Amino acid sequence: MNAQKLSELTGHGNPIFSIEMSQKPGILFSGGNDKGLVEWSLSDNAFIKVMFPVPASIYAIHCPVGFPLMFAGLRNGEVLVFNFVEQKITHRLRHHLKPIFDIKSISQKKELLVASEDGSVSVWNMDNLELLHTIKVSNDTVRCIAISPDKEQVALGCRDGRVMTYDAIDYAPVKALIGHTMAVFTLQYSPSGNYLISGSRDAQLKIWDTDNSSLITSVAAHMFAVNHIVFHPTRPYFATASMDKSIKIWDAVEFKLRKIISREKGYESHALSVNKLVWDGDKLLSASDDKKIITWNIEF
């Protein structure tokens, strides 16, 4: 496996906390500790525009498939809703009073899930953007959300180290997965749905069997916090981003490390924490506290 640096997207003046592919191919959105949400062209590797200004840092961006909407979760607890048809912010979801850390959707149910530092997840109707439910998950922060490929289960990662699973039909609690010793920052179901991977501030990856909620294995993945996990869209690999400034690519069958992208390995990579990753085919994009987005071509 080889990795080649293709380009850098620069222009952010502060750390970048979130990147998200648009519903429109070749377009990337980014946000962080800046004054606005930014649109980029991946075909030209160029800045397009600031989509809209924001009153607080952006911690989460979500572009749901099949909806002409983009959601931005802010540090002040607001969720801004940008409508691509109207080309403006049409709604401000003001339910949470503490930072929003993750946003996901279940398109078939037309429901949006928003995770907050207040320990709850709010569920919204995506047609009229009205609040449907609030799930009280923890006494502390809910950092991340994952939805199983069959859309039947939701997993929530908490600051207290637990992974809480819920039935996606009625949001009834299913199981608490106990194993991490620090906050769970990222969760991803495998494309097959056979297992769930959790990444934590304890630098561990834990792989959980989704049939019986048992722990399959633990991997000492990084030197510091695992900030993000993303599965390749078609190949049996996943990538992890860490506070230790590295990106690692793993075999999704044997959970073996296949590639390390870092300055220590000779790459002109990030100088600070790598916070988010997205795949664009075989290209991997990484966003960092160093204010850069880097595009990597991965040869399998």
Image: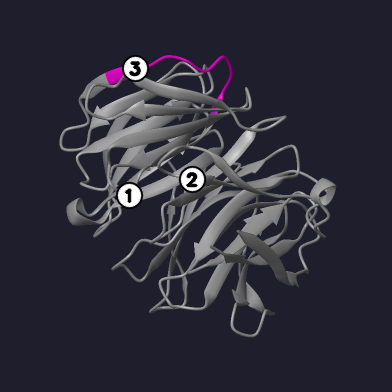
Q: Is residue 181 magenta?
A: yes
Residue at x-position 36% and y-position 61%:
64
- The amino acid pointed to by label 3 is Ala
Q: Which residues are magenta?
A: 175-184
Asked if the magenta segment contains residue 255, the reply would be: no
Residue 265 percent location from the top left of the image: 80, 49
The answer to whether mark 1 and mark 2 are in CB contact below 8 A is no
Q: Secondary structure at mark 1?
A: loop
The answer to whether residue 136 is visible is no
The residue positioned 65% from the left and 65% from the top of the image is 296
State how far apart marks 3 and 1 are (Cα). Answer: 22 Å
Sequence-first tag of 2 and 3: 3
Q: Badge 3: few (under 14), some or many (20 or more) residues near its Cα, within 10 Å?
A: some
Q: In 3D space, how far apart are the residues under numbered discs 1 and 2 (Cα atoms)?
A: 13 Å
Residue 23's mark? none
Tag of residue 176: 3
Among the two numbered marks 1 and 2 on one chain, the one whose residue lies closer to the N terminus: 1
* 186 vs 91, nearest the viewer: 186
Question: Which mark identifies residue 191?
Answer: 1
- Image point (72%, 45%), residue name: 246
Residue 199 x %, y %? 53, 32
Label 3, secondary structure: give it.
Answer: strand
Q: Is residue 238 above or below residue 214?
A: below
Mark 3 or 1: the one toward you: 1
Q: Position of residue 28 (x, y in %)?
A: 56, 70
Q: Is label 2 or label 3 in front?
A: 2
Q: Nearer the viewer, mark 1 or mark 2?
A: 2
Residue 208 in percent (x, y) is at: 37, 27
Residue at figure coordinates x 61%, y 39% from the top left: 227
Provide the residue designation for mark 2. 251
